[in-house]
Amino acid sequence: MNSASDNPIIFPEEEDGIALMGGSFDGLYVGMYADTMCIALATLAKITERRIDRLVNHHHSELPKFLVVNPGLNSGYMIPQYTAAGLLNEIRVLSHPATVDNVPTCANQEDLISFAYFASKKAHQISKKLEYILAIVLLTLRKLWIFIIP
């Protein structure tokens, strides 16, 4: 981050001089960490969505279907669980590592384009989608308290 450029810096000396590479231009390490965060966030999203399903699915719990006391026109927490599943699918698509697709440019004489920016951007998008899934599980757990503590 303190580099001057990605090209060598020339310091002329008395005879030959010296050329130093001052560039910190490769964002691959940042991108790999961002990709790892994407995978970790996707795992948390998957666990959370399954927790929501276990709460609203009467086949897996002794709770009423979709946490509705009087089922009928009220679908309870069925649609929020669908929403969580849809968000999880988007997160899974976004969690594919961006940095594995890096390529050299400029007739193979330039450095690899690491796609670290896209990895970081995906991590941000996934975190925003995960916020909604976590909110849904909190709403579901809040509803659960109604059945536990009358």
Image (cartoon, rainbow, N blue to C red):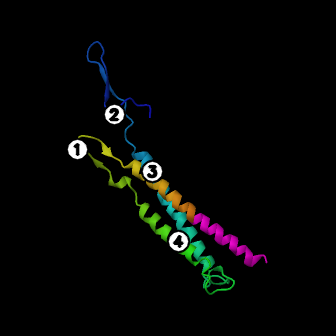
Circle 4 residues within 10 Å: few <14, some 14–19, many ≥20: some
Q: Please tell me whether mark 4 sits on a helix, a strand or a loop.
A: helix
Pointer 4: what residue? 83
Q: Is residue 109 left or right of residue 43?
A: left
* Spatial separation of the CA atoms under disc 3 and disc 4: 24 Å
Residue at (31, 31) in percent of width and height: 7
Residue type at mark 2? Asp
Pointer 2: what residue? 6
Pointer 3: what residue? 120
> Relative to residue 117, is residue 40 depicted above or below?
below
The image position of residue 47, as x and y in percent, is 56, 68
> What are the residue bounds of the magenta stretch?
133-150
Instruction: Kindly report the secondary structure that dominates the magenta region of the rendered protein.
Output: helix
Task: Tell whether label 3 touches label 1 (CB within 8 Å).
Answer: no
* Spatial separation of the CA atoms under disc 1 and disc 2: 16 Å
Pointer 1: what residue? 108
